[in-house]
Amino acid sequence: MWGGWRGGTAPPWSPPAPSDSPCPPQVLFLGPLIQLSMDCPWRWLDGVKGALDPRLWALCLGDVRWLRNQVVAPLTEELVFRACMLPMLVPCTGPGPAVLACPLFFGVAHFHHVIEQLRFRQGSVGSIFMSAAFQFSYTALFGAYTAFIFLRTGHLAGPVLCHSFCNSMGFPAVGAALEHPRRRALLPCYLLGLLLAELDHVVHVQVAGGRQHVLQRRGGQRQAPLVH
């Protein structure tokens, strides 16, 4: 993947070992996943059988919208905004600022929904632009997360799978969780998922900083700091 980087040299960071990879997005979506399990009328084994049913996959593969949301959009967007854009930004700004800047382009790229909603009058102008601002914030945060995964793993597969999973989950229904009959057990799961994801990020930053300090003391090649 890194061929051609500065004339074929290695990138200014070293992709970590698999055990050093960031937490999966399921941790971040711990609350919504628990909420789905609470509200799902099927048993767990029935859900697994349904997910493995070839007829279900045949219906999905025949649905253009499913292909767009789960296959085409994750692959093309991660290829452009992560695999192509990040390697150009990192040498100029460093990994940290690049992770923050790259998602801004990713968020602006989703403004085409505003033109579509205005053309078909899918709400008032104010509500459409408020929805666009909310979507921009969400896509920018999500883009920072997948950019972090790309830099930490050095592979495109992780961001693509994460993108597809998040598209299938949608934005967490916090309002529904607040009104849920079992919200006392559900809301801590939402907070726990956020805390575990943030703790994982902090641990990786501390480990990366300690590793860089050891390399510098040993007289090794100076590396650019990983994502902060």
Image (cartoon, grey):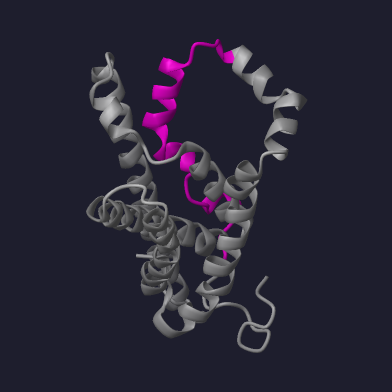
Judge from the rendering whether residue 153 lies leftward or rightward of residue 200; answer left or right: right
Vertical comparison of 10 with 197: above or below: below
| View extreme (front): residue | 120
Question: In terms of image quadrants, where is residue 182?
Answer: top left
Quadrant location, the N terminus: bottom right
| View extreme (bottom): residue | 7
- Residue range in magenta is 15-44
Question: In terms of image quadrants, where is residue 3?
Answer: bottom right
Residue at image point 52% right, 68% down? 81
Question: In terms of image quadrants, where is residue 142?
Answer: bottom left
Residue at image point 34% right, 65% down? 228
57 magenta-colored: no
Q: How many marks?
A: 0
Query: Residue 79's x, y, as percent?
Result: 60, 65
Query: Residue 208's x, y, as percent?
Result: 43, 63
Residue at image point 40% right, 81% down? 93
For the stretch drawn in magenta, what is the main secondary structure?
Answer: helix
Judge from the rendering whether residue 84 lies leftward or rightward of residue 183; answer left or right: right
The one of 167 and 93 positioned closer to us in this rendering: 167
Query: Residue 183's x, y, as percent?
Result: 26, 20
Query: Residue 67's x, y, as percent?
Result: 65, 46
Judge from the rendering whether residue 152 lies leftward or rightward of residue 64; answer left or right: left
The answer to whether one can see residue 205 in this image is: yes
The one of 187 and 6 positioned closer to us in this rendering: 187
The answer to whether one can see residue 219 in this image is: no
The one of 79 and 9 positioned closer to us in this rendering: 79
